[in-house]
Amino acid sequence: MTVFVMKLQHKFKNIESMLSRSVWSFKKPIMNHYQCAHDQWLHKLGDILLQYGIEYDTGLLPHEWEYQISKQGKISIIQKHVNQPMIHVNLSYSFPYIACVVDSQPVGIDIERISSKLDWKILVTCLSDNEAEIIHSNQDFYNIWTMKESLNKLFGKAKMYSLDEHDVTKQCYYRKQEVAFQHFIINDFIIQIAFINKNTFNLKSVSTFDLLSL
């Protein structure tokens, strides 16, 4: 299956103009409140990127499925055809990137900027001893951090309440199945996937212009 990543390379006014001419329609329910003005556009573009990803990986067109959103905010895709399997998806945002993943099994994804200003030596004290022992740089810290975040999203939780909630150096399980991790580095960003499928993921970069020009 595939991880799709899109970097916003246009001003939001230009994106709004491209969206108004695009063939894509929004399917995901709009949130009532956004922390920043650009969050709403990230949300809308994430919806379109997800529709594209589902069509790319499964061949399903947007009118052939519906969102199912749990009370915790976890998204699944329900096919309108009777007795068809659920499609599992997940989204993550870290401006200017949007990342989404499509899989046949439950999956979680997280994207974070690897900040050189982060004082990881202080933050490791909040982690398990096992995790702290293998962290020697900012990138090491973000690798552990995103493993925890993506695992939390695999579990369907809206947020992580404690850094020591899961020790990701030990084998983790979801519904009695072993969880695996895979990550990609793009510039100074890390994308982490937590999954139970046996297959690894391919990374596909998607241009904002090309996507909205379809």
Image (spheres, rainbow, N blue to C red):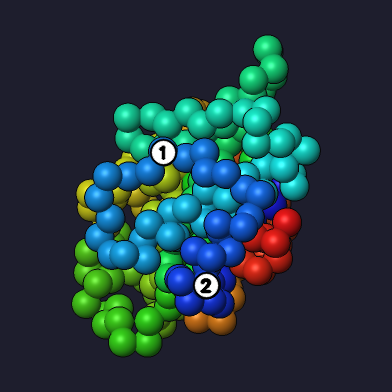
Q: Mark 1 points at which residue?
A: 29
Q: Residue at x 65, y 36 (%)?
A: 62
The amino acid type, in three-letter code, at marker 1 is: Pro
The percent coordinates of residue 15 (x first, y second) are 52, 67
* Image: 72 above or below 133: above
Closest to the observer: 174 or 33? 33
The amino acid type, in three-letter code, at marker 2 is: Asn
Q: Say whether residue 172 is visible.
A: no
Is residue 92 toward the left or the right of residue 117 in the image?
A: right
**Which disc is residue 14 wearing?**
2
Name the residue at the bottom extreme.
116
The percent coordinates of residue 118 (x first, y second) are 30, 81
Q: Residue at x 41, y 38 (%)?
A: 29
* Image: 164 above or below 206: above
* Image: 58 above or below 93: above
Quarter location, residue 186: bottom right
Circle nearer the viewer, 2 or 1 = 2
Closest to the observer: 73 or 65? 65
* Gap between marks 2 and 1 measured at Cα: 23 Å
The percent coordinates of residue 156 (x first, y second) are 40, 37
CB under 8 Å between callouts 2 and 1? no
Quadrant containing the C terminus is bottom right
Q: Which residue is drawn at 36% across and 61% down?
A: 39
Q: Is mark 1 on a helix, strand or loop?
A: loop
Q: What element carries label 2?
A: helix
